[in-house]
Image (cartoon, rainbow, N blue to C red):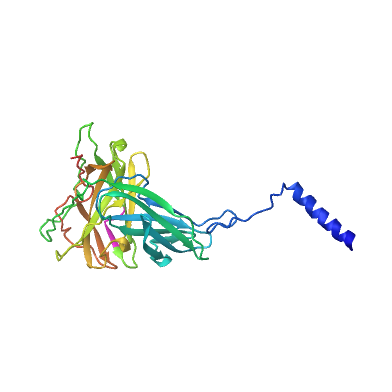
Amino acid sequence: MKQKTYLFITIVLWLVSLTGCNLPQINTGAGDVYGKKTQAWFDFPVDGMILALKPYELVSHVTDPGGIAQVEWSVNGSVVATDPIGKAVETVNELSEFHYRWTPEQPGEYLISVRPQSTGGEWGPSAKVRVTIPGEMTATPTMTATITPSLMPTITATVTPTITPTADDKLALVDMTKSTNQFYHPGCTPDSVTFTIRATKPQDVKYMYLFYKLMDTKGTGQTEINGGRPMKKTGTDTWTLTVKASEIEGYKRFANAWFVYQFIAQGGSEVVARSQAMGDIQLSVCGSAPAEPPGVTLTPGLPVINPSE
């Protein structure tokens, strides 16, 4: 019996010596199982951005093979919000998108982080970005549009707006497209609108934003302008963004509303170009017919885009 025991121990020690004493190990880091991890990253803002002193919508994507339970938002080390999976803007398979409305209190440097937790209870590593808000940047870009219901003549299909010619040395925003002239809430399609915009001098543009608000087609009121949605660069000179009805603050306030929007390009810390405000898209309750006439004193269809100011 002793000889068998001795032989067993000898075989085990021999196997260990062959592996160089490096026995297999399982990484017990947060959510890390056989190389699959709970992860998070920022879509906006980007690390190192210089921002104005105004509200922003933070955008993050998180993923885990077993599903995400919640995310935790922090600013300068202090937790500011914890959002369960039910607050995700969108979830497709293992990937979820979360938004958080953040308003910096004063100029300075901010460390923003988001930390994901899997359905198994494990916390993943935090995604972090550092942004700077200079003291002199306190102005919010403005956007105006005048609502005049029933005062405009009916628009005919023969109207063909053109792009205003600009000097070669100036940046201009051109070739704007939109996926629809009317979208709905709730339950009908389309329930979103997708925009694209092109810059003639993309090297001068660091960030592209879409500002928008809702204006009742009957002229009874309007919502506040959003804090600016960052658009995604999809080519050397093109940016795109999809806006869902349910993402718009106050989207249930009006049965029919004009979606008034404006593009603003930022180069570093300065606004380098902006479009005029446009109101040729309608957000309606499911089943509503378009309001007639259009109701805004803005160019219908393809808008005229202004060069940098």
Residue lying farthest to the top in this orientation: 168
Residue 181 in magenta? Answer: yes
Question: What secondary structure is the magenta-colored segment mainly?
Answer: loop
In this view of the protein, can residue 259 be seen by the observer?
Answer: no
Residue 12, percent across and down? Answer: 79, 54
Residue 304, percent across and down? Answer: 20, 44
Q: Nearer the viewer, residue 89 or 290?
A: 89
Residue range in magenta is 179-183
Residue drawn at x 16%, y 64% as measured from the top left: 221
Q: Nearer the viewer, residue 257 or 190?
A: 257
Residue 288, percent across and down? Answer: 25, 67
Residue lying farthest to the left in this orientation: 151
Up/down of 300 relative to 149, above or below:
above
Quarter holding the C terminus is top left
Q: Is residue 220 left or right of residue 273?
A: left
Q: Is residue 36 left or right of residue 116?
A: right
Quarter holding the N terminus is bottom right
Residue 266 in magenta? Answer: no
Residue 134, percent across and down? Answer: 25, 45
How many marks the image carries: the answer is 0
Residue drawn at x 69%, y 49% as measured from the top left: 22
In this view of the protein, can residue 88 be seen by the observer?
Answer: yes
Residue drawn at x 34%, y 59% as measured from the top left: 100
**Where, by quadrant of the figure, is residue 29 drawn?**
bottom right
Residue lying farthest to the front in this orientation: 2
